Amino acid sequence: MKTDQSIEHLMNCQILNEADAWRKILERILDVILFLGERGLAIRGKSDIIGDSHSGNFLGLLELISHYDPILKEHVIKVKQSQDKGQRLQAHYLSNRSQNEFIGLCAAEVRRQIIEKCKSAKYFSIMADATLDVSHTKQSSFVIRYVHEKEPGKFLIEERFLIFADCAKKTGSDIAELILETLETLKICFEDCRGQGYDNGVNMSGKYKGVQAILQKKNPLSVFSPCGCHSLNLCGQNAASSCTDAETFFGTVQTVYTIFSASPQRWEILQRRLHGVSLHGQSGTRWTERLESICPFYNHLSQIIESLKKVKSLYLTPKAKTEIRGALKYMSSFKCVLMSGILLKVLTLIDRCNQVIQSRKATIDIEVENIEALISQLKSVREEWPTILEEVHRKVKRKSFFGEQIKGDDLLPHLTY
């Protein structure tokens, strides 16, 4: 015992060495999980077998590191041998359950540090939104916003994701209750909330039964601020839905994109005439993306018409032929030329306002000023629409009488918005 040669001492040394080896193995496993998590890469694959090319990034990286790490190499070889024999090791920490446990522990630590920063900042704002995942489960995401003192005298506004919460119900009271329960679970005091940020849905922004109204009754200092981008999209959507000509134009643009994108042969015919310019589909929510789909119609309308006529000569279904005939008839009219010019101007204004809203350096005053300017311009377009059409038709008749060619660029400078 004096010379440290007893059986008890030797067994303790063996236990300590084994614990140190497991500690090093767990460090490498955590490093791989953090590496994949920081880059947003998938962890698992189709197989859980080491050496399989479909085993996923996690097992693949561990297998790669084991080529140069003796400790991890011995562990990976043991696991692989047990898998080949169909046996199960008592513990190897490479299974799906172990991966999920490591991910959960990392997420809990990150969330703990975010909550500590939020509590040190005292006041915060809450933002929430819901969407369906791949399993058709409606999940609500919670984001917290606070002012963090990065250095003495230097403050930084930080937005941090907190948690996903399942929310099958849609009423304002249910969502408000979910928000309060989530904050209570995370031990964040709702009395310190000074702002709410949601979309413009009735259940969220409703004046009486919306989430913001219910939460303001509990905390009057939690001021509601609707999503600026969502408000801008609603402005464009409502403006377009109030004009049948705009709806017809957008429908034709989407139909033409669907016709050409239906087959590689049709797309090739289009590319031969557009020379690198591509058509784009329309987003149902982000109206700023519709600017990309309008630009080809404004700049290359004649080339698109020629491409449609070429596609019409191919072997097509009766439905495709009907769609092409309808698109050609509309695109050959002056109304299409006029609408492409007007909507290009409107969507350009919407896109500029969207960039201001999403800019980190933009202030609230600038955002409100630009949105109000856009709304006033859209209202003026709607009020002056009959006068504009009358003036344009007068110029068209005059050009037609003298046999001059009518172009959209000739008429747009005469139009005022």
Image (tube, grey):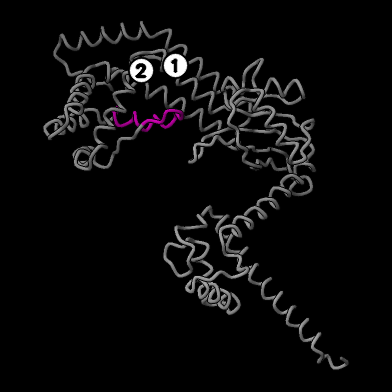
Above-or-below relation of 356 to 9: above
Q: Position of residue 152 (x, y in %)?
A: 79, 48
Query: How many residues crowd mark 2 within 10 Å: few (<14), some (14–19), many (20+)?
Result: some
For numbered disc 2, what is the local secondary structure?
A: helix
**Magenta extent:** 282-298
Asked whether residue 367 appears in the rendered view, the answer is: no
> Label 2 near label 1: C-beta < 8 Å?
yes
Mark 1: amino acid: Ala
Seen from the viewer's position, the closer of residues 250 and 152 is: 250
Q: Is residue 65 magenta?
A: no
Q: Residue at x 47, y 16 (%)?
A: 377
Residue at horizontal 47%, vertical 60%? 56
Q: How far is disc 1 from disc 2 in space, using C-alphas? A: 9 Å
147, 214: nearer the viewer: 214
Image position, residue 109 (x, y; %): 70, 53
* Residue 295 part of the magenta segment: yes
Residue of label 1? 239
**Mark found first going from the N terminus, 1 or 2:** 1
**Location of residue 187 in the rendering, given as x and y in whole percent from the top left corner:** 77, 40
Residue 104 visible in the displayed image:
yes
Label 2, on which residue? 246
* Secondary structure mostly taken by the magenta-highlighted segment of the chain: helix
Is 32 above or below relative to 262? Answer: below
